[in-house]
Amino acid sequence: MNCLEKALFLLCLAGQAQAADGLIECAAEPDEKLRLACYDAAARLSVMNSKPLLETGDPLAAQVPVTPAAATSTAVLSSPMAKFWELGADDKRGAFIVRTYQPNYVLPFHYTSGLNRASSRSDDPAGSNQNGYRKIETKLQISLRAKVAEDLLLPGADLWFAYTQRALWQVWDRGGSAPFRSTDYQPEAIYVVPVPEKLSALPFDWKLRMLQVGLAHESNGQNLPSSRSWNRAYLGAGFERGDFSLLFRANKRLRMQSDDDNPNLTDYVGRAEVNMAWVPGVSTVSVNWRTTLKSMSRGSLQVDWTYPVFASQPAGLRWYFQAFTGYGETLIDYKHRQSSVGLGLSLFQF
């Protein structure tokens, strides 16, 4: 009987003491291949004797530990989207912990094809102050979120609050005072409902991961006549397939009681948006398309690409490239069509 046969015999006995004896005999085996096979068989015996495992037909087959998540029909399997929105029970990380939301970046070199030097309203004198602005400026964005309630109303559903601030800074305008040309502020409430695994399957291996209901306010923080703002409610759905994810959102503008700063905003910026994200290895690519649902000549298209500055730290500092074309890169530009490109760094992600 060679060493491998001895190890298989020990497996049948399924005892820790016998396994220890088998290891001693494995060490005495002069043939390298047989010795390695002997050690492998004895190690599997040790694992089988120390864990509660599912039943299988082959005693040497890989076994799966029994877990409560695997036994429940409402479980949500973990994935990039599940981890980001904490959809599954194992993804939950508690409330009131601040995390990033939309990309956080600074683009020191941001060039636009057509700077908006005129106001979107005829009674706004701000346009006269923009004649000296440069087409090259700096664009930056900070976006954070925090969960404020877990398992709210529906199983696994969470309520999040988020805040995003985006600015265009004339930092290269040395002749002036390097002002901030535009700053937009967006607080937001998002109710996220995970879709159970048994209901998530779609054709072509796609999965419906979550549903969203949200309320958002966006404003440039100015007084009339330079003020631009709008409130909206939205419905969203998140899908995944391998390295790809899709997020669809339909916006419903909420009418304001007072004078509307920009009554036709959705005719330019859009009433719906689709965000596609792709993670091919260490780089990331995202495409955001906004549409009015009425005209293909309105809305916008934005592409973002990132890559690690240091290959050994893919979750750290990253190069950031952005390209935009269409309407509404900022609220002050909601009726102004332009194309822009920017290059810089992502600030942080957690």
Image (tube, rainbow, N blue to C red):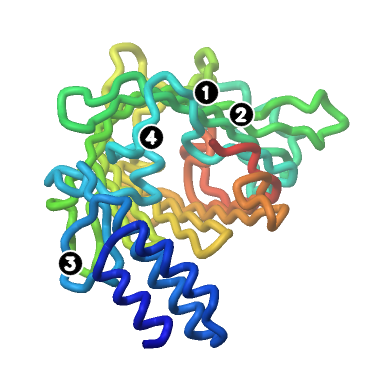
Q: Residue at x 27, y 34 (%)?
A: 192
**Structural crowding at the residue carrying mark 1, measured as other residues with C-alpha within 10 Å and reported as few (<14), some (14–19) or many (≥20):** many
Q: Can the viewer see residue 240?
A: yes
Q: Say which amino acid is labelled 3.
A: Thr
Q: Is residue 330 above or below residue 230?
A: below
Q: Residue at x 28, y 37 (%)?
A: 89
* CA separation in Å, label 2 and label 1: 7 Å
Query: 29 or 103: which is nearer to us?
Result: 29
Identify the residue under disc 1.
Answer: 220
The circle drawn on residue 265 is 4
**Structural crowding at the residue carrying mark 2, measured as other residues with C-alpha within 10 Å and reported as few (<14), some (14–19) or many (≥20):** some
The answer to whether the residues at label 2 and label 1 have Cβ atoms under 8 Å apart is yes
Q: Say which amino acid is labelled 1.
A: Asn
Identify the residue under disc 2.
Answer: 182
Instruction: Tell which tag, 4 or 3, sits nearer the viewer.
Output: 3
The answer to whether the residues at label 4 and label 3 have Cβ atoms under 8 Å apart is no
Q: Say which amino acid is labelled 2.
A: Ser
* CA separation in Å, label 4 and label 3: 62 Å
Which element type, helix, strand or loop, lies under badge 1? loop
Which element type, helix, strand or loop, lies under badge 3? loop
* CA separation in Å, label 1 and label 3: 63 Å
**Screen quadrant of the C terminus:** top right
Q: Quadrant of residue 229?
A: top left
Q: Work out whether mark 1 precedes mark 3 in sequence or the reverse, and give the earlier one.
A: 3
Q: Is residue 186 left or right of residue 241?
A: right
Query: 271 or 223: which is nearer to us?
Result: 271
Which element type, helix, strand or loop, lies under badge 4? loop
Q: Work out whether mark 2 precedes mark 3 in sequence or the reverse, and give the earlier one.
A: 3
Identify the residue under disc 3.
Answer: 56
Q: Residue at x 48, y 59 (%)?
A: 279
* CA separation in Å, label 2 and label 3: 64 Å
